[in-house]
Amino acid sequence: MGTDEAPLIVEVKGKDLDILSELSAEIKTKIQEIPELLNVKTNIEEGAPEIDVVIDRYKAGIYNMSVNEISSQLKDLLMGKDAGKYEKDGEMNDITVKLPEMSLSEFNSITLKNGNNKVPLYELAHIERSVSPKQLFRRNQNRIGKVMADVDHKVAFDHVVKKVKEQIASIDILQEYQVEVVGEEQKRQEAMSGLSFALLLSIILVYMVMASQFESLIHPFTILLTIPLAGVGAIWAFLILGKSLSIMAYIGIIMLAGIAVNDSIILVDAINQFKAQGLSLKESIINAGENRIRPIIMTSLTTILTLLPLTFGIGESAALLSPMAIAVIAGLITSTILTLIVIPCVYYVFDNIKMKVFKRN
């Protein structure tokens, strides 16, 4: 539905910042070759300049000073130390004691306390110039480098992700480091997994309802055959229109699992009623088709006409809901036509198999 992050994010997970920086830069160079990606950048790019104090543990041990003690004194001198409060105009203000601004050479000569003695900083450490990364992420005590990019929305997102994975596969990555595509791709995979479970659950629930209503375990399979007939129509519609099968389209296909079976229920129920009146199987199927063709077409047509404005972009959020409407309309068209042809044939075959089994018993 929208996010403040880049749609495509490649995460590099590891411990060494230098190796992360190299891998991130190499991945950035590789995926810049993909024309569908725009504004490729990493979080480990040059940011603000820094001065690193590299403590010599051997020399610190000679002076009997720990690393924590040295860093704590440097923090107090540079960041300031709380020295109490004072009152001004009825308000209490903090008193902070810290060193004034100094040059790099002056900083190198800072004296640290070692009991009653004083030790200059250059005796315990040396100073290095560096540049800090713009952002530094961590997860489970591991540093994370991110390569971010915008995607041309004229191209299907999963096609772009496939190209990115092919480019990453050509890079030699150390065993201790992990590279994976996250961002919208991760959310898409999670959504597709959840929707797949929803589709399976909806089919099971429809079968349970049909089995209880028709008091049969075979004929609900006849009704459920409408769902793949509807799904074929929805997929062909997107193929003909040249549109990608998005999450909303998949939701439309899940809706078809409940909508498309209505025509089959009407037809199968009519066949059962004519069989109960004493007609033969073939006569029951023919009479049911003749008597139920009008309500079946009317039921589907009302749903199709209701969703038609969404496909033309009429109304709010039409661009978002249009794939769902296209999936439902195309699925209903194919399921309605094929229901009147395929379902009677399948019912005839299943019922004959059922009669032969009962005769044998």
Image: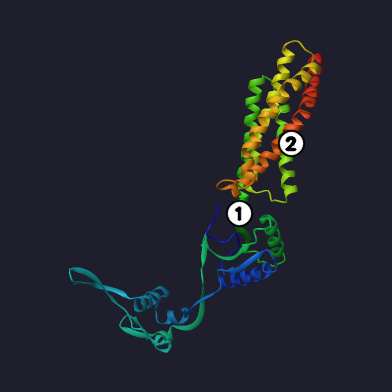
Amino acid on which disc 1 is placed: Gln
**Foreground residue among 92 and 342:** 342
Q: Which residue is mark 1?
A: 186
- The extreme bottom residue here reads 105
* Mark 1 vs 2, N-terminal side: 1
Callout 1 environment at 10 Å: few (<14), some (14 to 19), or many (20+)? some
At horizontal 63% and vertical 50% (from top left) the residue drawn is 189
**Viewer-nearest of discs 1 and 2:** 2
At horizontal 55% and vertical 55% (from top left) the residue drawn is 2
Q: Looking at the picture, does residue 361 appear above or below residue 335?
A: above
Which type of secondary structure does the marked residue at label 1 adopt?
Answer: helix
Task: Give x and y (percent) for residue 203.
Answer: 65, 33
Q: Is residue 83 visible?
A: yes
Task: Give x and y (percent) for residue 175.
Answer: 65, 64
Q: Which residue is mark 2?
A: 334
Q: How is the image coloured?
A: rainbow
Q: Is residue 192 visible?
A: no
Task: Give x and y (percent) for residue 161.
Answer: 67, 58
Q: Looking at the picture, does residue 239 appear above or below residue 263?
A: below
Q: Looking at the picture, does residue 124 appear above or below residue 133?
A: below
Callout 2 environment at 10 Å: few (<14), some (14 to 19), or many (20+)? some
**Foreground residue among 279 and 176:** 279
Query: In the visual, does 151 lie left or right of 226?
Result: left
Task: Give x and y (percent) for residue 11.
Answer: 60, 62
Inter-mark Cα distance, 1 to 2 = 33 Å
Amino acid on which disc 2 is placed: Thr
At horizontal 68% and vertical 39% (from top left) the residue drawn is 329
Q: Looking at the picture, does residue 270 appear above or below residue 233?
A: above
Query: In the visual, does 124 lie left or right of 95?
Result: right
